[in-house]
Image (cartoon, rainbow, N blue to C red):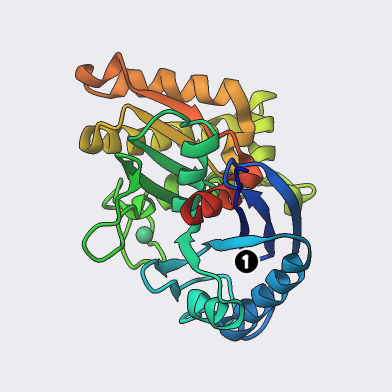
């Protein structure tokens, strides 16, 4: 009899923790989510995961645990080094606590790296072993995959593409530098630029709280001049970063994930068009920029890939 192993997988975000049972063939057997603890995440998150694993154990034979989490991760120790958007999460000993209470081996990866592995295993980068995965949402994340492995760098911090400088006279970033990619090509940057020009134009803004990246793009597509300008800047700045990364890594493939992947074909066609005009000739014929495919399941599938 062939035994197919089941893996308990978690995808820890600032608002929700998604979890499930995925077998080593990538079939999702069970999936649910719960709210991220609001206080003392360092202790409460590992404790919640142990509880969920114990409940899942009653129904499934589990061979190991895979975790994707927001924040910087020490993947060897399975610990969280630092994370924004959580209350007191730094230093959470995920692997150690889970092993101590469940005797299951546990593998931890940062969310962008996990999403990239998920896309390589079951999604947009299936069949590719070298590519970049760039997530565009409220911030910009990057994962570098070379020969089917995440490239981490010497200190484990590779892939901070959101903090490459694209305008040395640009806006101050939370990292302390000026003009980071994050400040120009994230969806928050798109929204902020649009809002700034609305404010400067003296127009009254209806439903101001409802304006997100999707809304700005939809207004641009409907001919709102200020939205068109903001979207143009966003597309150009986003492309500059992709061109820089291509000149450095020559990855052949860049997968764009995060909130922006919901924009579909018109968006990705536009990016490819602009990219081809800017990138050096040598890369033009074979470098493709595509959208991520797994959406909400990328982190869970990446966590499973890691642990299987
Ligand atoms: Zn920065």
Viewer-side residue, 42 vs 282: 42
Q: Is residue 214 left or right of residue 42?
A: right
| Residue found at x 68% / y 65% | 15
Q: Residue farthest to the front?
A: 1
Residue 46: x and y in percent read 60, 78
Residue where numbered disc 1 is placed:
14
The quadrant of the picture showing ligand 1 is: bottom left
Residue 123 location in percent, x, y? Answer: 54, 34
Outermost residue toward the top? 285
Q: Position of residue 277 (x, y in %)?
A: 32, 18
Horizontally, residue 132 falls left or right of residue 302, namely left
State the residue in front, 120 or 235: 120
- Residue at image position (40%, 33%) is 254
Please, is residue 32 above or below residue 240 in the view? below
From where the camera sits, is residue 158 visible?
A: yes
User: Horizontal and vertical percent for residue 284?
Assistant: 29, 17
Tell me what residue is drawn at x 31 percent, y 17 percent.
286
Disc 1 is placed on an element classified as: loop
* On screen, residue 301 above or below 44: above
Quadrant of the drawing holding the N terminus: top right
The front one of 116 and 137 is 116
244 with respect to 58 (left or right): left
Tell whether circle 1 marks a residue whose Cβ is less than 8 angstroms from ligand 1: no
């Amino acid at each position: 009899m062939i035994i197919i192993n089941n893996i308990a997988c978690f995808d820890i975000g600032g608002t929700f923790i998604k979890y499930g049972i995925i077998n080593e063939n990538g079939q999702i057997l069970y999936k649910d989510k719960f709210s991220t603890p609001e206080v003392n995440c360092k202790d409460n998150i590992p404790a919640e995961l142990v509880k969920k694993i114990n409940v899942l154990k009653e129904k499934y034979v589990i061979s190991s645990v895979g975790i994707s989490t927001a924040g910087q991760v020490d993947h060897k120790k399975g610990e969280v080094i630092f994370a924004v958007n959580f209350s007191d999460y730094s230093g959470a000993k995920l692997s150690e606590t889970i092993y101590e209470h469940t005797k299951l081996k546990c593998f931890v990866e940062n969310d962008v790296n996990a999403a990239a592995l998920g896309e390589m295993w079951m999604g947009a980068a299936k069949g590719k072993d070298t590519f970049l995965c760039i997530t565009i949402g409220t911030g910009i994340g990057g994962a570098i995959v070379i020969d089917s492995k995440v490239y981490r760098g010497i200190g484990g911090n590779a892939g901070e593409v959101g903090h490459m400088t694209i305008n040395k006279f640009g806006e101050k970033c939370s990292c302390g530098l000026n003009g980071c990619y994050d400040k120009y090509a994230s969806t928050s940057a798109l929204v902020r630029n649009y809002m700034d020009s609305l404010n400067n134009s003296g127009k009254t803004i209806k439903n101001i709280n409802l304006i997100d990246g999707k809304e700005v793009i939809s207004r641009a597509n409907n001919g709102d001049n200020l939205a068109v300008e903001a979207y143009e800047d966003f597309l150009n700045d986003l492309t500059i970063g992709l061109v820089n990364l291509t000149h450095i890594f020559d990855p052949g493939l860049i997968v764009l994930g995060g909130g922006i992947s919901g924009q579909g074909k018109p968006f990705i066609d536009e990016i490819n068009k602009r990219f081809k005009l800017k990138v050096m000739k040598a890369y033009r014929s074979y470098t493709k920029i595509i959208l991520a495919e797994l959406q909400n399941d990328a982190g869970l599938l990446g966590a499973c890939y890691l642990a299987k």
